Image (cartoon, rainbow, N blue to C red):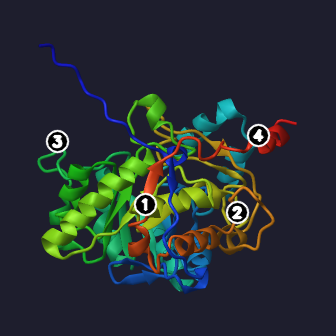
């Protein structure tokens, strides 16, 4: 008999819905803290390591708001003393010019003194200093990052695995890395059970989930890879729970990318996430440095850009985005309030309980009975 490749169904945010619980609780009674290594955060919201989203000033503001912002150490903040003029040039460029401008700007070398300076700026503001590097630069930069006083190291690429073949004598091995640095290491990105479990077994402190869903990412178009976020989160949450039963070590997972509304946030946690990481919503705040634009870490790649500059506008503040108050009815503000309310409707006192909420496949969840809303939107 011929053997045919079998395809399985995968689900994104718009394909599913959360089923209310059998009892409800007041939203103010729920707890939603996040732990990464020894660090505790009031809310499970992270700002993406994108140059137009996080600078030291934004990282401090995010810390004061109760969450965590991650600074990209391979971006403009460690290449230029003051990158504001470059950011202004990117913001004013045409769509066709933007990527070339970014490619040219990112050719400038990283400066060790700026790596240390940016970490110091965040620390002096009283914030947890979380920084991000790619696997290729990790072995070189990790000692400097630790010496400069960083609190958490994120190692990020489009896809990260525990086993990687390269031309070097020995590629990056996270178990070896963790023998030499003593700060929590969060790794990403993954979308599947086995790859996530292997990385957790190396001793990492957290995992990022998601390949290609971000508004500024084009990996799905350029490479054809990716798994919709609900399915990816479910798979990686299963690896986390398996690892916990196996070792007693709970490694939080962070759904990273593609999150637009409070409903998306809630579906991440119901699918099993411990936190969410977002770029576009934070890029639209007055505190973000990108002037209403943002782009992914792979956008300036010299040979194969896998991202694009997107315009989100400056249309809210960090306070309103996270906590409100808001007059918007589309779920794009007061994301913490939306999560609290959904947890209460599902009878979940904490995120671990909310991870057990029932979910259903419901592709009509956003269109059923909404004919008047669609008519208004098209007027």
Residue 185 to residue 40: above or below: above
Q: Which residue carries the number 4 mark?
A: 371
Disc nearer the start of the sequence (3/4): 3
Foreground mark, 2 or 3?
A: 2
| Residue holding disc 1 | 358
**Residue identifier under label 2:** 285
Residue 148 location (% of width, % of height): 39, 77
Give the mark, 1 or 4, whose residue is nearer the N terminus.
Answer: 1
Q: Is residue 189 above or below residue 305?
A: below
Question: Which image quarter is the N terminus in?
Answer: top left
Quadrant placement of the C terminus: top right
Instruction: Kindly check if marks 3 and 1 are in contact, taking CB atoms under 8 A apart as contact.
Output: no
Indicate which label's residue lies in the foreground, 3 or 4.
4
- Labelled pair 1, 2 in contact (Cβ < 8 Å): no
Cα–Cα gap, marks 3 and 4: 53 Å
The crowd level at tag 2 (other Cα within 10 Å; few <14, some 14-19, many 20+) is many
- C-beta proximity under 8 Å, tags 2 and 3: no
Under circle 2, the secondary element is: loop
Query: Going from the N terminus, do you reach mark 1 or mark 2 first?
Result: 2
């Amino acid at each position: 008999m011929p053997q045919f490749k079998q395809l399985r169904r995968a689900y994104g945010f718009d394909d599913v819905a959360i089923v209310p619980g059998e009892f409800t609780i007041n939203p103010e009674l729920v707890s939603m803290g996040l732990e990464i290594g020894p660090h505790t955060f009031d809310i499970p919201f992270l700002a993406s390591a994108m140059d137009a989203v996080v600078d030291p000033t934004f990282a401090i503001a995010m810390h004061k708001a109760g969450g965590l912002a991650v600074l990209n150490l391979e971006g403009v903040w460690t290449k230029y003393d003051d990158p504001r003029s470059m950011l202004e040039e990117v913001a004013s460029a045409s769509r066709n010019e933007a990527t070339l401008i970014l490619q040219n700007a990112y050719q400038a070398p990283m400066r060790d003194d700026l790596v240390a300076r940016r970490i110091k700026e965040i620390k002096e503001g009283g914030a947890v200093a979380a920084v991000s590097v790619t696997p290729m630069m990790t072995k070189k930069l990790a000692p400097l990052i630790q010496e400069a006083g960083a609190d958490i190291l994120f190692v990020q690429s489009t896809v990260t695995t525990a086993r990687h073949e390269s031309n070097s004598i020995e590629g990056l091995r996270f178990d070896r890395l963790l023998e030499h640095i003593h700060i929590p290491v969060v790794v990403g990105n993954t979308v599947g059970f086995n790859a996530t479990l292997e990385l957790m077994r190396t001793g990492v402190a957290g995992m990022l989930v998601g390949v290609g869903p971000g508004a500024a990412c084009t990996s799905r178009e350029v490479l054809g890879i990716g798994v919709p976020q609900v399915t990816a989160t479910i798979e990686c949450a299963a690896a986390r729970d398996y690892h916990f039963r196996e070792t007693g070590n709970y490694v939080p997972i962070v759904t990273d990318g593609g999150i637009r509304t409070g409903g998306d946030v809630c579906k991440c946690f119901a699918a099993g996430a411990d936190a969410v990481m977002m770029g576009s919503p934070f890029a639209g705040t007055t505190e973000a440095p990108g002037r209403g634009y943002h782009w992914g870490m792979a956008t300036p790649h010299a040979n194969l850009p896998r991202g694009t500059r997107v315009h989100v506008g400056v249309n809210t503040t960090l306070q309103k985005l996270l906590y409100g108050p808001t007059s918007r009815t589309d779920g794009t503000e007061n994301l913490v309030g939306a999560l609290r309310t959904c947890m209460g409707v599902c009878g979940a006192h904490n995120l671990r309980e909310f991870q057990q909420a029932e979910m259903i496949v419901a592709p009509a969840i956003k269109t059923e009975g909404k004919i008047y809303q669609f008519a208004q939107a098209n007027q």
